């Protein structure tokens, strides 16, 4: 593998998709080959799984089913798109990846850490981000933003305590893996965040 794998993580409304698009633009200006993708999704199968996962009408999905569906979408994504792109030398920029499972299903749904770890091993088979940007902001601020721009999906409609637990777990992940996971203050302006992201990414590029 000679590409470079970057993931963006953070709670609802943290501005991931905006920053992913801005980073893509910047990398392309530098002449880099870039694959931008997202989870759940990124493949035809993954997008179908995504619609099941986010449909507010699916009120009966259990925590275990939810975990396995995110993992299924990821396994397909890694094999079909991420791994081949990295093998071809591309920079892969992915909106949410395995840390989201640790935060949402692990902390949010209280699924045991050991099970989450096993699921990561099965779904990723070692394809792990070289760099993760955590766009961090308080849960209240994120939800307010998310609700202002779109209809809430199944996960977004969880109570505030759920989103606080998710945010705290992202912060815990960053604390435990400071070389890979870099926290950026997502309460700043879009331009200031993009600058902070670029200052982190540029020196690390192969
Ligand atoms: P988004 O792409 O609009 O951010 O929506 C994806 C939702 O799925 C978001 O609420 C976070 C959630 N999610 C998980 O619960 N587990 C995961 O593993 C991933 C990738 C996302």
Image (cartoon, rainbow, N blue to C red):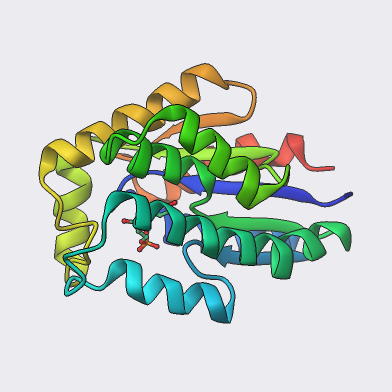
Which residue appears at 43% of the width and 37% of the height? 102
Q: Nearer the viewer, residue 25 or 153?
A: 153
Using the image, determine if residue 26 lies above or below residue 132. below
Which residue appears at 44% of the width and 72% of the height? 49
Query: Is any atom of residue 81 visible in this view?
Result: yes
**Residue 153 in picture, x, y percent from top left:** 22, 67
Q: Is residue 68 rendered to the left or right of residue 105?
A: right
Regarding ligand 1, which quadrant of the image does it lie in? bottom left
**Based on the displayed image, in which of its 4 quarters is residue 150 positioned?**
bottom left
* Quadrant location of the C terminus in the rendered image: top right
**Residue 171 in picture, x, y percent from top left:** 39, 26
Using the image, determine if residue 126 lies above or below residue 18. above
Q: Nearer the viewer, residue 129 or 142?
A: 129
Which residue appears at 46% of the width and 38% of the height? 134
Q: Residue furthest left?
A: 159
**Residue 60 in picture, x, y percent from top left:** 19, 64
Q: Nearer the viewer, residue 132 or 112?
A: 112
**Based on the displayed image, in which of its 4 quarters is residue 203 positioned?**
top right
Q: Nearer the viewer, residue 120 or 186?
A: 120
**Residue 202 in picture, x, y percent from top left:** 71, 41
Q: Is residue 78 rendered to the left or right of residue 85?
A: left
**Based on the displayed image, in which of its 4 quarters is residue 58 positioned?**
bottom left
Which residue appears at 79% of the width and 64% of the height? 85
Q: Residue furthest top?
A: 176
């Amino acid at each position: 593998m000679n590409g470079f794998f970057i993931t963006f993580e953070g709670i609802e409304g943290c501005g991931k998709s905006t920053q992913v698009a801005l980073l893509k633009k910047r990398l392309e200006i530098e002449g880099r080959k870039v694959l931008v993708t997202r989870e759940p999704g990124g493949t035809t199968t993954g997008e179908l799984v995504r619609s099941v996962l986010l449909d507010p009408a699916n009120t009966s999905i259990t925590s275990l089913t939810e975990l396995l569906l995110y993992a299924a979408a990821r396994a397909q994504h890694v094999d079909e798109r991420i791994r081949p792109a990295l093998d071809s030398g591309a920079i892969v920029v992915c909106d949410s990846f395995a840390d989201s499972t640790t935060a949402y299903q692990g902390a949010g749904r209280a699924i045991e850490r050991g099970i989450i770890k096993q699921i990561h091993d099965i779904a990723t088979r070692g394809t792990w981000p070289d760099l993760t940007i955590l766009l961090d902001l308080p849960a209240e601020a994120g939800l307010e933003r998310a609700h202002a721009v779109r209809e809430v999906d199944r996960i977004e409609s969880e109570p505030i305590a759920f989103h606080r637990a998710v945010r705290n777990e992202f912060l815990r992940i960053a604390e435990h893996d400071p070389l890979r996971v870099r926290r950026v203050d997502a309460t700043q302006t879009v331009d200031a965040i993009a600058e902070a992201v670029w200052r982190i990414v540029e020196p690390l590029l192969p």
